[in-house]
Image: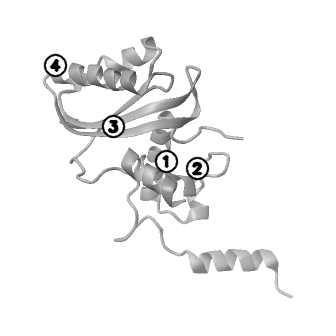
Amino acid sequence: MKNKAFDNTSSRMLLNKSCPLSGKDAPKIDYKNINLLKKYTTEKGKILPSRVTQVSTKKQKELSQAVKRARFLALLPYVSN
Amino acid sequence: MLYESVFVFSGQLSPKLAEDKLKETLEIIKKAGGKILKQESWGLRSLAYKIKKNSKGYYYMINSEAEASAFSSFNVKMKQDDDFLRFLNLKIKEVEKELSFLDESKTKEKVYEK
């Protein structure tokens, strides 16, 4: 029998090797695009780490800036239970 | 300089009063020599958290060409005026022709689809 943990990591790496927010058809990161930002935050409202989402460093920076702007405008929560 | 500004007014106001508030703020920008290039209404939205005991707010976005000094009074106003909940001002490189994701016409359609 295979090790489950090993299976999970390998499949994640195979599926998502490149940044989903880079490239030609990638969506624009914008504080107004709440649906996109919600995909990169946890249920509690925390920003997901790039090592989980495979977002590039450059895009992760833009993403965090956008989330923070959306939070200020109360479009996204700082914390939600 | 091109700017994108978002204003949030208290949801306890009537739609008319909120419009008046917006006009007031636009007047301030115009008086300071600014030009309003684009105006969007995002309608009455529920806030992600309470601001000054409000759980809803009227959202307006404008794109303008103005001097930075035109916006200088708004941050003070945000603190003093109970109905002026939020003000966000950003420099932008160009005015987007399309309506943004949150414009009322778009968000209303989505509700019908569901």
Residue A47 shows which numbered tag? 2
Q: Which label lies toward us, 4 or 1?
A: 4
- Residue identifier under label 3: B61
Residue at left offset 59%, top offset 52%: A41
- Residue identifier under label 4: B31
Q: Is residue B105 left or right of residue B29?
A: right
**Are both tags, 3 and 1, on one chain?**
no
Residue at left offset 23%, top offset 19%: B28
| Residue density around tag 2, few if under 14, some if 14–19, many if 20 or more, within 10 Å | some
**B18 or A52: which is nearer to us?**
B18
Residue at left offset 43%, top offset 57%: A59
Indicate which disc, 1 or 2, sits on the residue closer to the N terminus: 2
* Residue A78 sits in quarter: top right
Kindly report the distance in space between the C-alpha atoms of the residues bearing marks 3 and 1: 21 Å
- Looking at the rendered structure, the secondary structure element under dot 4 is helix
Residue found farthest to the top: B80
Query: Is residue B103 shown to the viewer in this render?
Result: no
Kindly report the distance in space between the C-alpha atoms of the residues bearing marks 4 and 1: 35 Å
- Residue identifier under label 1: A64
- Hey, what amino acid is under mark 4? Lys
- Image coordinates of residue B70 in percent, x first then y, are 22, 22
Kindly report the distance in space between the C-alpha atoms of the residues bearing marks 3 and 4: 19 Å
Q: Chain of mark 3?
A: B
Indicate which disc, 3 or 4, sits on the residue closer to the N terminus: 4
For the N terminus of chain B, which image quadrant?
top left
For the C terminus of chain B, which image quadrant?
bottom right
Q: Chain of mark 1?
A: A
